[in-house]
Image (tube, grey):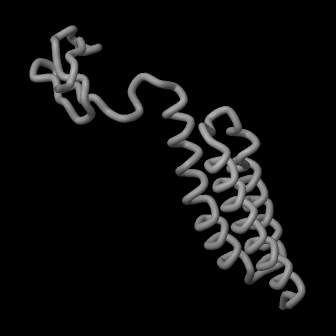
């Protein structure tokens, strides 16, 4: 049985499980409510998933011209630094998580770096 808690909006007593909606004010208990670590973990997970995809699309579209390629590479470098697991080291619970996210980051950035290197070796018109 779930425990009861008070709604932070109207102080009405509701269940404390995820997805519970307060009948008075409509407040919904969500996963990211409360603990700061959950919010940071969610941000880091989203960065880990979407950053390589955004970088790949940016580099592919920017590869038509030398100057757009430089801008695309700068955007890639910015996103790579912002999604680095070193910036989020306080959120990892286990060594497996740490190793898993480092592997994802290294593999994704290695692929992106080799793509940029190969495009730049091809030359531009």
On-image quarter of the C terminus: bottom right
Of residues 91 and 60, the one drawn nearer to the viewer in this rendering: 91
Note whether residue 68 is visible: no
Left or right for 90, reference 122: left
Of residues 78 and 35, the one drawn nearer to the viewer in this rendering: 35
Establish if 64 lies above or below 75.
below
Give me the residue at 55% from left, 49% from top: 45
Of residues 90 and 12, the one drawn nearer to the viewer in this rendering: 90
x, y (%) of residue 114? Answer: 81, 77
x, y (%) of residue 115? Answer: 77, 79
Give me the residue at 49% from left, 33% from top: 38
Establish if 46 lies above or below 39.
below
Q: Residue furthest left?
A: 23
x, y (%) of residue 9? Answer: 26, 14
Establish if 18 lies above or below 78.
above
On-image quarter of the N terminus: top left
Q: Quadrant of residue 113?
A: bottom right
């Amino acid at each position: 049985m779930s425990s009861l808690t008070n709604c932070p909006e109207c102080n009405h007593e509701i269940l404390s499980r995820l997805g519970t909606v307060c009948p008075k004010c409509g407040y919904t208990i969500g996963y990211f409510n409360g603990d700061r670590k959950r919010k940071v973990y969610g941000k880091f997970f989203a960065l880990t998933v979407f950053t390589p995809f955004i970088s790949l699309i940016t580099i592919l579209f920017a590869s038509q011209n030398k100057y757009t390629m430089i801008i695309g590479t700068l955007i890639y470098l910015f996103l790579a630094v912002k999604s680095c697991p070193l910036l989020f080291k306080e959120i990892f619970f286990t060594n497996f998580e740490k190793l898993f996210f480092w592997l994802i980051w290294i593999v994704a950035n290695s692929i992106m770096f080799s793509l940029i290197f190969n495009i730049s070796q091809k030359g531009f018109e």
